[in-house]
Image (cartoon, rainbow, N blue to C red):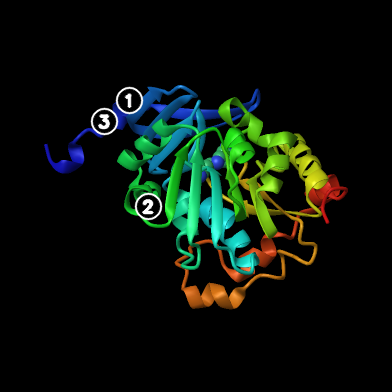
Amino acid sequence: MNSEDKLNPTDSMNLWVSERSNDNFSMAFRVNKVLFSQQSQFQRVEIIDTIGYGKMLLNDGLVMISEKDEWIYHEMITHVPLLTHKQPKRVLVVGGGDGGTVREVLKHPYVEKCVLCEIDEVVVEACKKHIPQTASVLTEEKQRLEIKFEDAVSYVKATSEVFDVIIIDSSDPVGPAAPLFNEAFYADCSARLNTGGIIVSQAESPFIYADMQESLCRILKKRFKKLAIYNFTNMTYPNGLWSFTFASNDTSLDPATCFDEKRFFSLCLDCQYYSPAIHRASFCLPPFQKTRLKAYLS
Ligand code: SPD
């Protein structure tokens, strides 16, 4: 038997993992091997090696990241607010236990402290072991990173720390992440922002979760004078187009235009999706989304 005759184990297994969005649509990925599967105190945590998308993290069956394109989401959730803020020194990342957002935050040398508040230690430990592409920073960074295994709702309520940028890198609004989409949580977050502070949140898809996106905008609009939404496209999340909200009480901030392009080039950020042109373009919303959200955007 020569090497080409060898059986690929997946040919015989033909195993797929799928994320079902609703009764009529699901997305499926071909599995090579299940690397990790454990019921934590909060959710089922799984890491699966797929044939086409590399390793994937799933929480309660929902795909959080894949190695193939995690950098798109992580660059956009991070560099848009950090380059819009004039001098971000203190950053809070809520959720984000895979480490991808922290990796991007710490590319900014003037960030003195990054707090990662992740409820589920199992996610962090599993990612450190199996997905170093995002999580090696969680092992290696000793100086500027503080990891708290804590419910972020309780953390932002109790802490006296203040931040220049808060990034809500949550999973979907079900299970342990559901309270991260509530008004009470954003009220506490706004109290933890320095003057001129920015809060960015993962805001689901304008195609299939438009109601949820509108509900998040309604909540943010009550707390923040400036609210915008920006989009990116990706391969891993259902339907491709996905959004982040951008909120601040600094009304002079127009995130689509007032960001530090020179800083981007001087830092030589090693980006594969984010660029100043993409930054500007990401705030151009398609009419169906703009019409739906126009009452909230400012
Ligand atoms: N359906 C996935 C929604 C986005 C989840 N957040 C991913 C966390 C990546 N750090």
117 vs 215, left or right, is: left
The percent coordinates of residue 33 (x first, y second) are 32, 31
Numbered label attached to residue 13: 1
Numbered label attached to residue 9: 3
Quadrant of picture, ligand 1: top right
Numbered label attached to residue 80: none
Numbered label attached to residue 137: 2
Q: Report, in whole angstroms, how far the alpha carbon at label 2 lies from the one at label 1.
A: 34 Å
Asked whether mark 2 lies closer than 8 Å to ligand 1, one says no
The quadrant where residue 56 appears = top left
209 vs 128, left or right, is: right
**Is disc 3 in contact with disc 1, using a CB cutoff of under 8 Å?**
yes
Q: Which amino acid, by three-letter code, is at mark 3?
A: Pro
Q: Earlier in the sequence, mark 2 or mark 1?
A: 1
Residue 237 in view here: no
Q: Report, in whole angstroms, how far the alpha carbon at label 3 lies from the one at label 1.
A: 6 Å
- Element assignment for label 3: helix
- Element assignment for label 2: helix
